[in-house]
Image: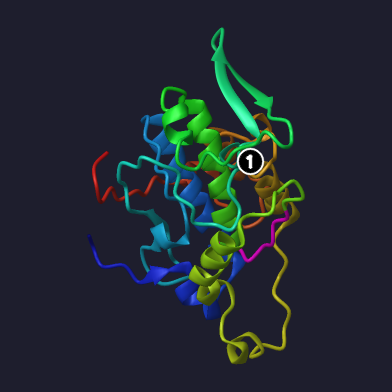
Amino acid sequence: MPKYPGHSSDFRHQFDLRWAVPFVQDLAEALRHCHHSGIYHGDVSMDNVLLNEEPPNCRAVLIDFERLNQFTMKHKTNPPEVQGHWNITFVDNSLVYEEVPTGQRMDRQDSILKEVAAIPEALERIEVFTFGLTAARILRFDLEHPWEEQMEESRSSECAAEHEAADNPDEEDSDSGDEEEEPVPEEMQALLRRCCSYHPLERPLFRDIVKEMGSGSFTFARPVEAAVTNTIPINAI
């Protein structure tokens, strides 16, 4: 693999929405290209998105392509269908989600990828959710999930410890600036909330995300014609 400067969290002291929003836009375009080609990445997180050079003239590089047998938990929140909130079927060429009653929900982290392996759109809607979580972390935006069930304490604690360094910079560093950070643009916040919608059918697909971000109405985003696909497949699928 070529030498890259690192992850967006490595440059938190140079954070600026003017490069971070297009960086997220690149990630969406890379994932659009993957799913258009029938590829489910399955491990979308800050760990697997590199900068091709130091900010602000950076683009996103999606890495670590490998065949996965089960859903990879990289965030504190799993998609609701992975948590067991939805049964997924494909009826008469239509994707159907049926909500599972409370008390009958079973965690499907180990089985969900096998269950929907033949339903590409269901896989994409799962990946859109993890894209939303990843983009929110890159942009330092807190997403809330009021529907979320309480996870087992050990799992939650383990995941929190794994990302503590990236999520919570040293106290000395966090207090180093007197100016407040510029808020994430409202249209970007709204898009990420939709990406992490409780009902999977309310989430946009990657082609819609790329089109919306490149429409010219998103603050700091590049026009659609300027977007490029930048994926580095480390392990062939």
Classify residue 154 as left or right of residue 33: right
* Residue 231 position in % (x across, y down): 34, 48
Query: Which of the 4 image quadrants contains residue 186?
Result: bottom right
Report the side of 88 relative to 229 (left or right): right
Q: Residues within 10 Å of mark 1 (few under 14, many from 20)?
A: many
- The residue drawn where x is 59% and y is 43% is 79
Q: Is residue 112 visible?
A: yes
Q: Is residue 144 above or below residue 116?
A: below
Regarding mark 1 in the picture, which secondary structure is present there?
helix
| Majority secondary structure in the magenta region | loop
Given the image, on which type of amino acid does mark 1 rest? Pro
Q: Indicate the position of residue 163 as horizontal and vertical percent values.
A: 51, 69
Q: Identify the residue at image location x=52%, y=66%.
A: 158
Residue 150 screen position, x and y as percent: 69, 54
Residue 152 within the segment the image draws in magenta? no
Q: Nearer the viewer, residue 117 or 191?
A: 117
The residue that appears at 58% across and 44% down in the rendered structure is 129
Name above or below for residue 190 compared with residue 12.
above
Q: Nearer the viewer, residue 194 or 27?
A: 194
Q: Which residue is mark 1?
A: 80
Q: Which residue lies most toward the top here?
A: 92
Quadrant location of the C terminus?
A: top left
Judge by depth and name the residue closer to the eye, 24 or 102: 102
The magenta segment is 138-144
